[in-house]
Amino acid sequence: MASKLEDDLSCSICLDIFKDPVFLSCCHSFCRACVEKSWKDKVSKECPLCKKRHSKPWLPPDLPLKILCEKEQRSSETLCNLHHEKLRLFCLDHQEPVCHICRDSKKHSEHRFIPINEAAEEHKKNLEETLQPLKKKLKAFKEVKVKFDLTEDHIGVQARHTERQIKEQFKKLHQFLAEEEEARLRALKEEEEQKRQRMKVQMEALRAQIADLSQTVRATEDQLTAQDVSFLKNYKAAVERVQQHPLLEEPQLPSGALIDQAKHLGNLGFNIWTKMKDLVSYMPVILDPNTTGSFLILSDDLTTVRGGEEEQQLPDNPERFDLFRSVLGSVGFNSGAHIWNVQVGDCAWWSLGVIAGSVQRREDIRSGLWRVWFWGGEYRAQSPPHRSTVLLVKNPPKRIRVNLDCNRGKLLFSDPDTNTLIHSFKHTFTHRMIPYFETGSDCRPLKVLPEKVSVTVGLN
C-alpha cells in the first residue's frame, strides 16, 4: 500500500512520483511531460484538474517538489518492494536483501539469513579482495603511462636535436658547394679574361695591317686612274710602294683560343664529390642512442661514448640496457666480414666486442656476449658459456681493431698500430651480431675511428 507521502508526491495524470515537476497558474503540479502531452493538439492550455487556463507562456519548474520527490525516491529504494518494510536481513540462498516479512514467506522458507550489516561487511571485503588485482593493474598502467609520457617528451628532444645536427651538416655541405661554385666560376672568368685579352692584342695587330694595306691599295688605285704622263712619271714609285708589302699569309685563329668547356664541365659532379672526401668521413659503426645506458653520454655525431657522473632520465624502451654501462652499434651483421677500429687511448675501463641481437637487455647479457675488456690494469676475454680468462698484453694498445668474419666464424681483436693479435674467438654465429661498447665514469672517451674513403674508376 502506498503511503500518504507517496500520494502527495504523485502526479495525478501518470499516478507516479513526479518527474521534472512544474506548476500551473492555478498552483496544481504535474510532470512536465504529462502536462505537455495533455495539451497536445489543444488550442487552450487548461489545468487537467481544475480546467483553469494557464496564463504564462512557459511552465515554471516546481523545485521544492522536485527535491522532495528525489528524496522520496532515494528512501523508497531502501524499502522492500513487496512489503514496504526496511531491508534488515540478507538471504544467503538468494543473495539479496529482504525484510522480516519476506523471511517468513514461502519464497524464503528454510533459507539462511544474516543481518544486513554483516552481509554488507562480508561482501565489501570480498569485493575489495576482488578489486585488488584491478587496482594493481591500474597502478601498473599509471606507471607505464609515466614511461610513455617520458618517451613522448624524449621523442621531441631527439627530433629537435637531430634536426639541429642535420641542419649543421647540410650547412657545411652548402658552404663547401658554395665555395666550390665560386672557385670554379672564378676560374672560368679568369680564362675568359685571358683569352679575350689575347684576342684583343691580335685584333689590334690585324686592324693595323688592314689600315696599312688599305692605304697602299687606295694610293695605287689613284695612280691607275691618273693621266698617262702622270702615271708613267709615278709608276716606279707606285711599284716600289706595293712591293714594300709582300703578300703575307692570312692570319689564322690561334689554337686554344676558345674556352675549354670540357675542363670546366667534364665530370663536374664526380670531381666535386671526389673532393668532398676531405670534408666528410665514413664511420664503419654508428652508436645507437636508443640502447645507451643511463650513465653514458654520446657525442653529437654518435661516434664517441663516455661515462657520466649522474644518471640521465631516459625512456625505459626495450632496446636500452639497464644493468650495464653499455651501448650498441646501430647496425648488426649476420654475414660477411666487418672491421672497425676504436680509440681507447688511456681509458681506464673499456669493453669491446659483439653481442647477439636476440639477447634481452633487461637480463644478464653475458649469455650472448663475446668481448675483450680492460679494467684495473688487467686485460681479459670472455665468451659464453665460459668464464673470463686473463690476457697477456705486453704493450698497452691505444687503438683496438675488431674484426668480425661471420662466414668463417671468427672474431679477432688486435692492435692495428703494431699489427699484434690480442685475442681471437672461434664460433659459429647464428644470430645477428651487433658491435658492443662499455665504459665507466671518470674514463677517457671511446671513439669509433673513421675509415679512409677512396674513389676508383673502373673501365669496362
Image (cartoon, grey):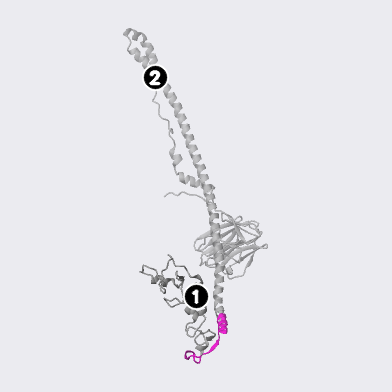
Give the amino acid at mark 1: Cys
Q: Which percent across, then down, holds residue 68?
A: 51, 74
Q: Mark on residue 146?
A: none
Q: Find the residue positioned furthest to the top.
A: 229
Q: Label 2 vs label 1: CA separation?
A: 131 Å
> Is disc 1 placed on a helix, strand or loop?
helix
Between residues 217 and 282, which one lies in front from this camera angle? Answer: 282
Report the residue marked by disc 1. Answer: 69
Question: Nearest the camera: 141 or 111?
Answer: 111
Question: Left or right: 292 with respect to 222?
Answer: right
Residue that mark 2 sits on: 213
Check disc 2: other Cα within 10 Å, few if <14, some if 14-19, many if 20+.
some
Residue 261: x and y in percent read 43, 38
Residue 260 visible in the displayed image: yes
One can see residue 285 in this view: no
Residue 365's quadrant in the figure? bottom right
Residue at the right extreme of this rendering: 376
Q: Is residue 407 above or below residue 222?
A: below
Q: Nearer the viewer, residue 254 or 267?
A: 267
The amino acid pointed to by label 2 is Leu
- For the point 50% across and 40% down, the residue is 182
Answer with mark 2 or mark 1, whichever residue precedes in sequence.
1
Q: Position of residue 428 (x, y in %)?
A: 52, 67
In this view, 299 is above or below 127 = above
**Part of the protein shown in magenta:** 104-125
**Magenta segment includes 107:** yes
- Numbered disc 2: secondary structure: helix
